[in-house]
Image: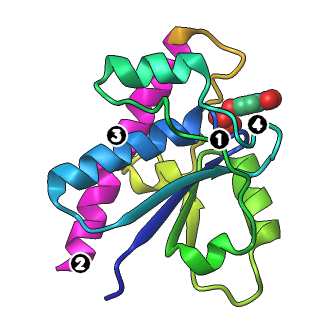
Amino acid sequence: MTRPAVLFVCLGNICRSPLAEAAFRAEAKRAGLAVAIGSGGTSGEHAGDPPDARAVRTAAKFGHDIAGYRARKISGEDFDRYTHIFALDHANLAALQRLAPAGHNVHLALLLDVVPGLAGRSVADPYYGTEADFAVTWEEVALAARHLVMQLAVQAE
Ligand code: 4NP
């Protein structure tokens, strides 16, 4: 099997998907899973920006340094680079479906689809919320990261 490459996608790539990337990086490392990992946004509005300060603080609280991450707008070429693309919510899944080249081979889904009982659910956007909302985001993406690593580890066997 080819080495998996996983991309997490939200709107701005400054709040949810950087947290998902950090949580998944840590879980994959813990599990010794060989996987390429990235994140991006469907909007280019924050391209080049570091993550939101609240996301940086939340990641730090859980032991992860994401201050060096920089936002990037995704493109159709990401469907050549990644084997799995996970949208953090329905709106971004729809945007990805519009961007997807015909006949692509990527596993495209909502991130919470990997969590039993949470399929079809969006990770709530904390951008207009409080730091407590970012902690909820962290819990959701960390849970998804654990399930996703388990699933990819089984497939790699
Ligand atoms: P993200 O959060 O998609 O989780 O990075 C947002 C970032 C920026 C905006 C909205 C959500 N915005 O409206 O600029």
Task: Report x, y in % for residue 91.
Answer: 76, 48
Q: Is mark 1 within 8 Å of ligand 1?
A: yes
Q: Amino acid at mark 4?
A: His
What is the distance, in whole Å, between disc 1 and disc 3 at their CAs? 19 Å
Task: Report x, y in % for residue 101.
Answer: 76, 81
| Residues packed near mark 1 inside 10 Å, few (<14), some (14 to 19) or many (20 plus) | many
Q: Is residue 133 left or right of residue 6?
A: right
| Residues packed near mark 2 inside 10 Å, few (<14), some (14 to 19) or many (20 plus) | few
Which numbered disc flags the more N-terminal residue, 4 or 3?
A: 4
Say whether residue 135 is visible.
no
Figure quadrant of the N terminus: bottom left
Q: Assign a secondary structure to mark 1.
A: loop
**Cβ atoms under marks 1 and 2 closer than 8 Å:** no
Whether residue 144 is in magenta: the answer is yes
Q: Is residue 148 left or right of residue 150?
A: right
- Mark 3 highlights which residue? 143
Q: Is residue 10 above or below residue 155?
A: above
Q: Is residue 104 left or right of residue 97?
A: left
Whether residue 141 is in magenta: the answer is yes
**Cβ atoms under marks 4 and 1 closer than 8 Å:** yes
- Mark 2 highlights which residue? 156
Q: Residue at x 48, y 48 (%)?
A: 112
What is the distance, in whole Å, between disc 4 and disc 3 at their CAs? 26 Å
Which numbered disc flags the more N-terminal residue, 2 or 4?
A: 4
Q: Amino acid at mark 1?
A: Asn
- Mark 1 highlights which residue? 13
Q: Amino acid at mark 3?
A: Leu
Which numbered disc flags the more N-terminal residue, 4 or 1?
A: 1
- Mark 4 highlights which residue? 46
